[in-house]
């Protein structure tokens, strides 16, 4: 008889963990407080370190043509749109062993759910919100609210994939400070691509550097829509209970912020009828990534600033790492402790490099000019090689070189 894992949260990290652990031989119950509607929001850059895992789990075929492989990352200067660099991605599969993809979060969620539905060892309890848990040497007991009624679940372990406001993290680390809200906010919009100027409709991810701000845009769903993300600081504040991912933004505010950028940026922004604001939250991995038979993954463990586009990718890596260490009939507390220790090193580097990348994006004046000259001097090959550690790395570094998760 297989062991039983409870996962709180059926987002990208929770669903991927369910798939990876089911492949490893576990029976899985996912608790999800929502009705599992497609996530509102936004595009994702699925880098090769994540797409390799999704391919191993048979998710990529279900994502199909909803995902787009960009031919390059195009870096432009805000003042006049001049190209600083164009980093080729056409050889991503050959270089890193998996494709670099662009996809809508909702499409990835749907592909994960379709893959989960094909595995009888995974059960999803929707509209079921975890309220409490207790762990003993032999297992975990969880209580939840299913509608207005209380429900109980027993398992060998509990994984908290419950996001930045994680109840599981709070319980494991009661002295933890609340999540740090960065000075910057991401303004996100989806627009019909045929409304954009032709040179902004290319099959590439375009990044505009500017003083104190940057913009990223890339096509989704076969190029029919374009995802726009503008990041800059502002006086925006969020109530403690606000929906972090659905606050509306005033189009006049973002238009004014980028009024002195290249005219094509103005045209890009003008196509968006609706903006949503996301605060950029970063939080170091907790002291107690795991405790006994309870552990964290994804944003519950390590919200990451988006400047390396690794938020979802690192949650996917967490899932693969869990399946490397957590096997049926293993010493569960020891396996979860080993998982957290192995992941901490890589996550701390990703967070550090992402923070540094954000500083470079937002330089102004002479430092910005020096940055642009340095990027041009490096050239395409050396710039691409700077990402080998990330895109070609394993979820647990040296510990995972000779170990598979399924």
Image (cartoon, rainbow, N blue to C red):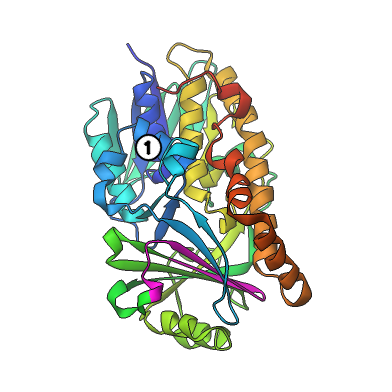
Q: Is residue 132 visible?
A: no
Q: Is residue 162 within the magenta segment?
A: no
Say left or right for 244 vs 257. Answer: left
Where 333 falls versus 142 (above or below)?
A: above
Where 232 falls versus 29 (above or below)?
A: below
Q: Nearer the viewer, residue 352 or 127?
A: 352
Say left or right for 64 vs 164. Answer: left
Q: Position of residue 43 (x, y in %)?
A: 40, 59
Write the residue at 51% across / 29% down: 321
Q: Position of residue 397 (x, y in %)?
A: 61, 29
The total of numbered circles placed on residues is 1
Q: Is residue 347 visible?
A: yes
Give the magenta-colored segment's residue range: 199-217
Placement of the N terminus among the 4 image quadrants:
top left
Q: Position of residue 287 (x, y in %)?
A: 69, 37
Q: Position of residue 121 (x, y in %)?
A: 27, 25
Where 75 falls versus 133 (above or below)?
A: below
Residue 126, image quadrant: top left
Residue 268, image quadrant: bottom left
Mark 1: secondary structure:
helix
Write the residue at 49% across / 42% down: 315
Say left or right for 325 vs 56. Answer: right
Write the residue at 44% across / 23% down: 405
Q: Nearer the viewer, residue 39 or 44?
A: 44
Placement of the C terminus among the 4 image quadrants:
top left
Q: Which residue is mark 1?
A: 54
């Amino acid at each position: 008889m297989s062991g039983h894992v409870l996962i709180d949260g059926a987002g990208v990290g929770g669903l991927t963990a369910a798939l990876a652990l089911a492949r490893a031989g576990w029976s899985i119950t996912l608790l999800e407080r929502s009705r599992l509607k497609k996530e509102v929001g936004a595009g994702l850059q699925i880098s090769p370190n994540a797409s390799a895992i999704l391919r191993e789990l048979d998710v990529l075929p279900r994502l199909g043509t909803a995902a787009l492989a960009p031919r390059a990352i195009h870096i432009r200067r805000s003042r006049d749109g001049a190209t600083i660099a164009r980093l080729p991605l056409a050889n991503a599969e050959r270089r890193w062993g998996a494709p670099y993809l662009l996809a809508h979060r909702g499409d990835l969620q749907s592909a994960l759910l379709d893959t989960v539905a094909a595995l009888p060892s995974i059960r999803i309890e929707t509209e079921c919100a975890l309220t409490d848990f207790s762990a003993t040497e032999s297992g975990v007991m969880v209580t939840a609210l299913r509608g207005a009624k209380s429900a109980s679940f027993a398992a060998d372990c509990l994984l908290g994939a419950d996001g930045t406001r994680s109840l599981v993290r709070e319980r494991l680390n009661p002295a933890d400070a609340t999540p740090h809200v960065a000075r910057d906010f991401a303004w996100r919009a989806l627009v019909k691509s045929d409304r954009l100027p032709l040179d902004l409709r290319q099959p590439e991810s375009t990044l505009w550097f500017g003083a104190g701000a940057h913009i990223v845009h890339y096509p989704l769903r076969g190029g029919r829509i374009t995802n726009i993300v503008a990041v800059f600081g502002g006086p925006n504040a969020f109530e403690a209970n606000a929906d972090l991912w659905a606050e509306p933004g005033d189009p006049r505010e973002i238009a004014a912020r980028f009024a002195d950028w290249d005219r094509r940026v103005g045209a890009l922004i003008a196509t968006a009828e609706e903006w949503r604001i996301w605060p950029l939250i970063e939080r170091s991995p907790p002291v107690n990534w795991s405790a006994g038979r309870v552990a964290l993954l994804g944003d519950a463990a390590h919200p990451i600033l988006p400047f390396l586009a690794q938020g979802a990718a690192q949650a996917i890596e967490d899932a693969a790492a869990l399946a490397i260490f957590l096997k049926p009939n293993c010493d569960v507390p020891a396996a979860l402790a080993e998982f957290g220790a192995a992941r901490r090193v890589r996550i701390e580097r990703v967070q550090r490099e992402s923070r540094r990348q954000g500083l470079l994006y937002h330089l102004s004046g002479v430092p910005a000019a020096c940055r642009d000259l340095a990027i041009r001097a490096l050239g395409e090959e050396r710039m691409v090689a700077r990402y080998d550690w990330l895109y070609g790395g394993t979820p647990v570094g040296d510990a995972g070189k000779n170990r598979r998760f399924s």
